[in-house]
Image (tube, rainbow, N blue to C red):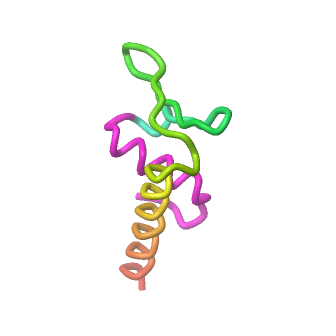
Amino acid sequence: MQSPTQTVETRTLAVIAARLGVPLGTVRIERGNVFYETAEGLRCACSVGTPYWHGAAAEAVTQQIIQQAKAR
């Protein structure tokens, strides 16, 4: 469950991690790209600002809105 105090960036990384099936702690942004660690090594998921990134950000915001509505 995402905390309402998390940044949009952190929530977006959480969505990307979930999509990839990896722990959030293995996902990070470096030089405008989203990387994640696997047993085989470092992989690139996407670049910040791409349609994939924006889709994940939209999903993160939607999840937050739904959680807030359920809390009411």
Q: Is residue 21 magenta?
A: yes
* Residue toward you, 30 or 21: 30
Q: Residue 19: x, y in percent? A: 33, 45
- Hey, which residue is sitting farthest bottom in the picture? 72
Q: Residue 8: x, y in percent? A: 58, 59
Query: Residue at coordinates 35% horizontally, 45% vertically from top-left?
Result: 18
Q: Which residues are magenta?
A: 1-22
Looking at the image, residue 14 lies above or below residue 36 = below
Direction from residue 34 to residue 18 in the image, left or right: left
Query: Residue at coordinates 51% horizontally, 61% vertically from top-left?
Result: 3
Q: Residue 24: x, y in percent? A: 46, 39
Looking at the image, residue 18 lies above or below residue 66 = above
Q: Quadrant of residue 58?
A: bottom left
Direction from residue 4 to residue 20 in the image, left or right: left
Looking at the image, residue 17 lies above or below residue 72 = above
Q: Residue 60: x, y in percent? A: 45, 61
* Residue toward you, 5 or 43: 43
- Hey, which residue is sitting farthest right in the picture? 31
Looking at the image, residue 42 lies above or below residue 3 = above
